[in-house]
Amino acid sequence: MSALTALNAEVVACRRCPRLVEWRERVAREKRAAFRDQDYWGKPMQGFGDPGARILVLGLAPAAHGGNRTGRIFTGDRSGDFLFASMHRLGLANQAESVSRDDGLALRGAYVVAAVRCAPPANKPTPEERENCAPWLEQEVSLLRDLHVVVCLGGFAWESALRLRAMLDGDAIPRPRPRFGHAAELEGVPWTLLGCFHPSQQNTFTGRLTPGMMDAVFARAVELAR
Ligand code: SF4
C-alpha cells in the first residue's frame, strides 16, 4: 500500500470536528431530492490526482451535495465542472467531466485537495476546524515531493497554504501578510503560491471569474511547474 493510500485510509475515518461530522452525516442521510436514490459518501474527502504532481490545487471544503455525495473532491457539482474544464484545456486532466468516482477522470501533473475535508454548513468552516484539519493537509502535501506551485482557490485556501508553507519552511508568515487576489503570486520555498478566485457559482454566474481568467492562472502554474 502506498503512503498516500495509507494516509487516506486514516483521513476517511476522522471525526475530529463534531459540528462537521454531524452535518456531513445528516446531509448524507437526508439527501437532496434529485439524488435520493444515491448512496452519499458522507465522510471526509481524500485528495485526488497524480502522486508525482508539480501543481497542487487547494480548495476550501467539499460541497454538501457534490463531494460529500460522490466521495471525490470537486465532483458532482458546478464548481468542479468549471475547475476540471479549465484543467482539461490546460492539459492537466484527461477529460472535462467530473461526475462520479468512476467516471475515468485522471489528472496529469496535478493533485487536488481541500483545506477542510468535511462539508461545512453554508460552505463556511470555522478557523478552529481549519486548524483541526491542517495536520492532514501537511501530511498529504509532504508526500507530494515534486510540488512546485500551489493554486489557492479563494482566500481561505490562500490562508491555509500560507500557514502550511510557513510550517514546512520553519519560517514565519511574511509581514505585511501577503494578500489574496486573483492571479496573486507569492514566490518562496518549498513552493510558489498562486491565487485564483474560487469557482463557486457566486463567482462564475456573476462573471467575477470567467473561464479565461481561470485558464490564465493554470497557464501560469504550468509555466512555473516546468
Ligand atoms: S474537517 Fe478534517 S479534521 Fe475535521 S472531522 Fe473532517 S477530516 Fe477530520
Image (cartoon, grey):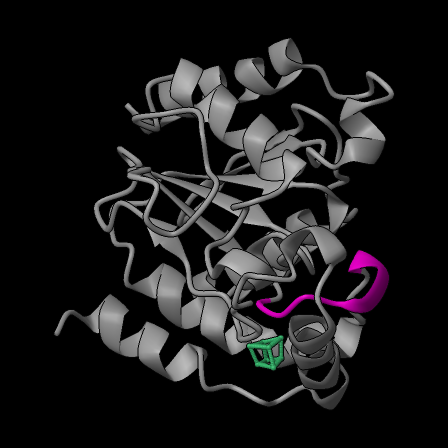
Q: Nearer the viewer, residue 162 or 82?
A: 82
* x, y percent for residue 129: 71, 77
Furthest-left residue in this view:
1
Furthest-top residue in this view:
212
Q: What stretch is highlighted in magenta?
A: 117-123
Quarter of the render that holds ligand 1: bottom right
Q: Quadrant of residue 217?
A: top right
Q: In which quarter of the image is the C terminus?
A: top left
User: In the picture provided, is 143 more to the left or to the right than 69?
Assistant: left
Q: In which quarter of the image is residue 153?
A: top right
Q: Nearer the viewer, residue 124 or 186?
A: 124
Instruction: Report the number of discs.
Output: 0
* x, y percent for residue 108: 26, 33
The structure residue drawn at horizontal position 81% and vertical position 29%, both measured from the top left corner, is 203
Furthest-front residue in this view:
37
The structure residue drawn at horizontal position 33% and vertical position 37%, both measured from the top left corner, is 105
User: In the picture provided, is 198 more to the left or to the right than 62?
Assistant: right
* x, y percent for residue 22: 73, 85
Where 109 sits versus 123, above or below? above
* x, y percent for residue 8: 35, 73
User: In the picture provided, is 107 more to the left or to the right than 220?
Assistant: left
* Residue 69 highlighted magenta (yes or no): no
